[in-house]
Image (cartoon, helix red, strand yellow):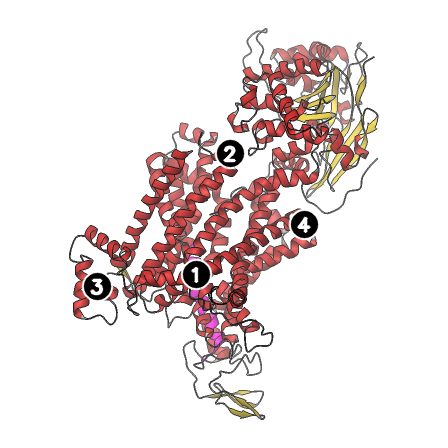
Amino acid sequence: MATETTTDFTLDTAAALAAEEHGAIEGKSPWVLAWRRLRRNYVALGFLAVFVVIVVACLLAPVYAKHVAHTGPNTNHLGETFTRDGQQVQVISEGGFVNGQFKAGGIPVGPQLWHAGGRYVFGADSQGRDVAVRVLYGGQNSLKVGIGSAIICCFFALVAALLAGYYSGKTDWLISRVFDLIWAFPVLLLAIALGTALSINGFHHFGINIEAGSLWIPTLVIAFVLIPYIGRPMRGQILSLREKEFIEAATAQGASPFRIMFGELLPNIASSVLVFFTLIIASNILTEAGLSFLGAGVQPPSPSWGTLIADGQDRIQTAPWLAIIPGIAIVLTVLSLNVFGDGLRDALDPRAKVKLEH
Amino acid sequence: MLAFIIRRLLGAILVLIAVSFITYLIFVKIPGGDPAPRIAGRTATQQNIEDIRQKLHLNDPFYEQYWGLMKSLFSGELVSYSSQLNVVDQIKQGIPATFSLCIGAGIIWLFFGILVGLISAVTAGQASDRVITVLALIGISMPVFWLGLIVRYLFAQGHPFAFMPDGEYVPITQNPWQWFVHLLMPWWVLAVLFIGFYGRVLRGNILDTINEDYVRTAKAKGLPQKRVLVKHVLRNSLIPIVTLFGLDFAAVLGGSAILTETVFNLKGVGWYAAQAVGDLDLPPIMGVTIYATFFIVLFSVVVDLVYAYLDPRIRPT
Amino acid sequence: MAERLVEVKDLKVQFATEDGIVKAVDGVSFELDRGRVLGIVGESGSGKSVTSMTLLGLTRDKNTRFEGEVLYKGRNVLEMNESELQEVRGNEMSMIFQDPMTSLNPVYTVGAQICEAIQVHERADKRVARRRAVDLLKQVGIPNAESRVDNYPHEFSGGMRQRAMIAMALACNPDVLIADEPTTALDVTIQAQIIELIDRLKDEFNSAVILITHDLGVVAEIADEIIVMYAGRVVERAATRQLFYDPQMPYTWGLLGSIPRLDREKQERLHSIEGTPPSLIRMPVGCKFRPRCPFAFDKCMEEPDLVNRVEEPKHLDRCWLSVPEKRKLREATIQGEVAAA
């Protein structure tokens, strides 16, 4: 009596066991297996492509500004007109009666899309600046802060976790206490507090000099407050790896601590680090947006997606595109990273045990 | 057990002391320059500034400065730089709005987060799971303040679908119905992000737990499916959710709902801090930070205790 | 004539996976009578666990395909629906697993987990169930059963935990106890105690036991009959004494040779079987053990049948070598003079 099989492949315990043993017996490296799995995940790869397109577009902001929009991110066009479908339109309307209806003055023109030959594709803001250009330049800053802070955060978190996990004892105690202390603060408020404090005069201690308006401030602030977020799960994983026999073997062979930490422990958590890294870029972009929205992140006149939304806040009723469009940019970017990060995690470990947690 | 609780509480107090010291570092030391004018207030006279210098012992060693700062904070003398209003008073005034927002949103996101995660896990791979996953992913990819703005744009007064009031907090003592109606949008906006996140976490936990050996044992014992699901799978999957919730709830109570409060003009604690940022006004931010950290530390202890109750392995023997 | 409890007829279990169809079990047959102990021996990937889990319907999934019959007291398990299976599981056939630490739910007391089985199958009330749980714990040799019944799994030592699992499995007086690697996760000294316990309980509860392991030393004590599995099939089957006395499969020799023994000359090294088990998706042609067998010859390209080749009629094997040849080669292998591969 045979029951039919279907082609929907999900793995049950016994089947997974069988498949695992099969895979292990065939002796393929886990990275090769992971790559094969990732390659088949069209959704994840598709969103990775979206992210890459966004990054490239933002990098090409100067090109866009010069050749498509014919204006810069900070150039005002108050009182000017431009051509839309052959007609002259005011950048900022003057108000008065239009077709019998009274329209209030001072409303910037909305998204023109392709009607104005590349200008004001996403409309203008209250100072007549081209929103599309600002979104692209803002994207540069948001991505710089998001990716930069992710790199710095993962680097320090990893080093701290390796030291804590490998040396244990007092080193571990100290590093864990530092993690606890940073983590005792609510992440957002700590970032706001640091961001604000550093925006007063910048940071001029210990021989490091960072000016108040620098992008380094939000970057370092966000990296700093999230070190425990990455560091603690990493430390946990390293602690459990540390007890495994291959570490004992390496020590017995006379490997130096550096060698063990970076040659043995690190490769084994590499897949977790990769996934965390991807996901935390997404999270940092959101955090930067929030900080900049409040004024504790990227400082004007530098645009970022967060500051753009803040600019559009007061005009949400009359010029909604000012706030909506930068937000869409954020959502697309963050969503792409999240979907790809998920796909990456599924590929690297179909039953991932280490997760980002509080 | 009592020893465990006492130890945790002592630890918590130590953490609070350390936190207050770090706050001092952030607000007095890091910006560099002369903190006195920043702390005395914009309209302060030279005499005020001198007074502040005295009170905060700014000409003395750092530990005296720290002590002076703490004293002025807790004695209620700390004053906002721009508004000259007492920081502690302002925080107290903000509490009703913040608590109303957070408790309501918390109930919503906990309930729906669990519901969504459960449905998603039980129907894993099918259409309902995929839809939920997509929605959850979008939910966690949206900046909460942006969502708030859009919701306001669409639903608040003066608009196509207008049927909601446009933010602003109405105290429950003043008008319960209005209190409720004004909070509906903020509740849901704040909850969306968490529902997405909790749903995914629970789904992951459930799918992991289903593969655990003890679930296989439960099945092998001949227990009915529902019992296996509820008593063995759910019971274990929910433990991390409970601890997550404890900490998230503490965070928003402490003012991490700052973005939602700002967008909806709910004059809570977070809103108060947001106003201060624009003016680079440090005292309120300092006050709110300590207030918020207090909540987090307190709830950490509570969460630890609850966790020990739920997971016998953690209990100290 | 003892009652026939379980009869497996040409069981085949296949899983559809990303890489192809895994033939986890490929034609396995055996019988189990009341009061008897059947040992199933093999490496990981041999299909022994899948076979035993299939007896309780635990391998059912939309990607699993079954053929053959699994008869429990005449009823085909493969055709039972979920509620019929729930009736059988824990009640008429029970199973204990390899790692008692992870096989018990950490958030419930051991007593609660034992009572659960009793309450569900016999609708007993809490007090009755609890008393039964305490008695069971005493029967499996746990001291201070009265208080330990309220302990959590992590408060037990490894051996105690496995005893508790056995108590849980026997709670409803099942006729068949399936023990899947019950001693693998335990210390050697505890292993013997657990095996003895299973043997004693089998008589006390008048049931039958299927003991699954990769270690021939474990089954030697209590099994009446042993089947050796490889690549999803039975490759040798005999009464225990017969198997140890006159093993016919080179694979079995390898398994025997890898047991350290006190009664023989001290060997230079323990010999293990070289190579790894075959992929269950792309199996080798002919005899599945051929790639690893040091004695393979041309006839081995044709898959041997499981038939009786020796004098003892109940001893079946799958090897083309003639019996006298085998006996000569065997001694050398087991003595360690010739490497098993």
The magenta-colored residue range is: A125-150
Parent chain of label 4: B
Tell me the tag on residue B312: 2
Q: Earlier in the sequence, mark 1 or mark 3?
A: 3
Q: Is residue C108 above or below residue A135?
A: above
* Residue A217 appears anywhere in the view: no
Viewer-side label of 2, 3: 2
Query: Which residue position is annotated with label 1?
Result: B96
Query: Which residue position is annotated with label 3?
Result: B36
Where disc 3 sits, the SS reads helix
Circles 3 and 4: CB distance less than 8 Å? no
What percent of the width, then of the height, locates residue B112?
59, 54
Q: Earlier in the sequence, mark 3 or mark 4?
A: 3
Queried whether the magenta region covers residue C209, the answer comes back as no
* Residue C144 appears anywhere in the view: yes
* Residue C239 position by quadrant: top right
What percent of the width, then of the height, locates residue C159?
56, 20
Identify the amino acid type marked 1: Pro
What percent of the width, then of the height, locates residue C107?
55, 34
Circles 1 and 2: CB distance less than 8 Å? no
| Picture residue at 58% right of the left edge, 80% below the top | A114
Parent chain of label 3: B
The reply to the same-chain question for discs 2 and 4 is yes
* Residue C281 position by quadrant: top right
Identify the amino acid type marked 2: Pro
Query: Which residue position is annotated with label 4?
Result: B125
